[in-house]
Image (spheres, rainbow, N blue to C red):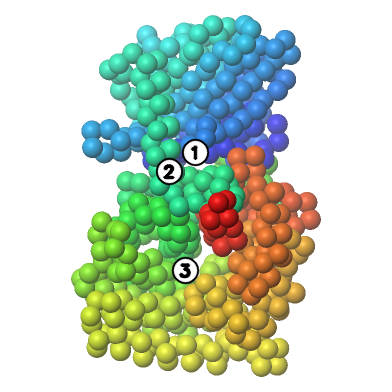
Amino acid sequence: MTATLELWPIGNCQVSALVDRAGRFVWGCTPRVDGDPAFCSLLDDKPPAGETAYGFWEIDLDGAVETTQSYLRNTPVLVTRHVDGQGNAIEVIDFCPRYRHNGRIYRPVAFARIVRPVAGSPRIRMRLRPARDWGATRATTTRGSNHIRYLVADRVLRLSTTAAIGWIEDERLFRVERPLHFFLGPDESFAQEIGPALDSMLDHTINEWRLWVRGLATPYEWQEAVIRAAITLKLCQHEETGAIVAALTTSIPEHADSGRNWDYRYCWIRDAYYTVQALNRLGALDVLESYLEYLRNIVDNARDGHIQPLYGVGGEATLVEREAEALSGYRGMGPVRVGNQAYEQIQHDAYGQIILSNAQAFFDHRLLRIGGIEDFVALEPVGERAWQSFDKPDAGLWELRTKSHVHTYSAAMCWAACDRLANAAEVLGLPEKHGFWRDRANRMRSRIESAAWRPDTERISATFAGDDLDASLLQLLDLRFLAPSDPRFLGTLAAVEAGLRRGSHMLRYAIEDDFGLPHTAFNVCTFWLIEALHFTGRDADARLLFEEMLSRCTPAGLLSEDIDPVTGELWGNYPQTYSLVGMINCAVLLSKPWSAIR
């Protein structure tokens, strides 16, 4: 079966797995999202059922002719139903336990699967073949009376089960006559009977997620799409530290054979800002509060206010990039990269995103911890960096590896850093600080407006020195740098749409970068266009384009980073937080009010 991005994420904010359309685990790392993948067949073109293949977990119904999949409502609990040619059927329930227990969230490094007979006398074969060392070898095993132990990376995972161990170990066909339970987790004995324990974990996990969703302030329209996007964004948070990763995968190419294969399993300050911004609009303050704790530690550890573009989920600053040579890549399109050299880049917009993410804490009285003067003082070195850097060259938000410019988006984000510090100082009753940061913000605005405006073409340029088009210019609206009615924004919108729109999709830019001309559109840029259309009075166009984007989602209701504007095929890492953020933001903007149902 050719690998596709028709994948269903499960997880518990500690570990996650991607389940393909055959119900097979094809991607999943331990002991956390940026760890060594125990399931890596998504990035290897060895046939999954081959004798030498490994890096997957499949439950195969003998003679299966039909497979259907769906999530249990308002949860990331996946149900896969298999039917064979004689009408025999099973359902497989996949989840990662996550629920409140003894005053804290229980989220083990564990994956649970429950197989239930549905009709007839179904026969299954289970192949559990974890990998280690980034696909270099298959995990070695030992067995006990009711378990099999797998040595993966630097730890042991134990499969505890109610099925016959010998049949699992031998990968033998056997009949399913009762529910079977499988728990792949820590190398610890079950204190309870496995079946009832997993059934209880499932019930608690379902309830935990549904209670979380119940607290979301969803829009009236597109509720299912918004809820699914919100749940998946929550799965992208490493709850232990509060970090939010850009995607659950690495090295899915931006387009076929592009070499644009990057590891997104880290916390980009930019992506995380957009994620908490979207979830704030739904009232998911737990994500914001956890992320702010992560950010405060990043700021405390920053040298003289310098902020990297990304960090590890534990706050690690060094993310050396290398290639995993044992894996051939998605559809054989390597390389597979581990780590991301962008941590060494200079990206000035990070200063703005640090302060924008923190700004709400000074104003939002719902938060358990309101921002105080000590938090303001800790942020001032970041603001100082923004002031010093806003008109200096950087790699930009698209992380160009061999080019450097003064990017208007980065400059505007630095302006936003100083502007929001002024706002915070005002609410904290610090008039001198308010005046200080307001003066800096005003001087930065004046410089940006004069350096980026192109009177000949009547638009803002993406760089100070050139006359470039870039979809990020649409974010000048969201930053409140320009108003929707400002002729400068209207001229910029017209130019960006004419130059970068390809049918129903938007490119980031249309000039050569480190890898040549881009071939695919960037999904979040299309959502930025939808927002701009809405704010400039083109609501009908915005709704039509939004519905088109929703139709491009995978069966799981999700999007990756990129899309082929001609074929509609999804490319890039998946599920991608930027794209899910766009879905939420546009739904909130475009939806009819709840009063419309009265």
First in residue order: circle 3 vs circle 1? 1
User: Hey, what amino acid is under mark 3?
Assistant: Gln
Q: Which residue is mark 2?
A: 214
Tell me which corner region of the image, top left, top right, bottom left or bottom right, holds residue 534.
bottom right
- For residue 74, the mark is 1
Labelled pair 2, 1 in contact (Cβ < 8 Å): yes
* Residue shown at the point (48%, 14%) measured from the top left: 180
Above or below, 122 relative to 270 = above
Type of amino acid under label 2: Arg
Compare residues 512 and 136 and report the one nearer the observer. Answer: 512
- Crowding at mark 2 (Cα within 10 Å: few <14, some 14-19, many 20+): few
Mark 2–mark 3 CB contact (< 8 Å)? no
In this view, the mark in front (3 or 1): 1
Which residue is at 33% across, 24% downward? 187
Q: In 3D space, how far apart are the residues under numbered discs 3 and 1 (Cα atoms)?
A: 39 Å
Q: Which mark is residue 308?
A: none
- The tally of labels here is 3
Q: Is residue 49 above or below residue 494?
A: above
Query: Is tag 2's residue or tag 1's residue first in the polypeptide sequence?
Result: 1
Marks 2 and 3, how far apart at CA? 40 Å
Vertical arrangement, residue 384 with respect to residue 558, above or below: below
How far across and how far down the image is residue 39, in percent? 52, 33
Which residue is at 44% across, 43% downward? 213
In this view, 88 is above or below 79: above
Secondary structure of the residue carrying tag 1 is loop
Depth check: give the residue in front, 153 or 444. 444
Q: Return the residue at label 3.
A: 345
Quadrant of the rendering where the N terminus is positioned: top right
Residue 277: where, in percent of width, then height?
A: 45, 62
Residue type, numbered disc 1: Asn
Q: Earlier in the sequence, mark 2 or mark 3?
A: 2
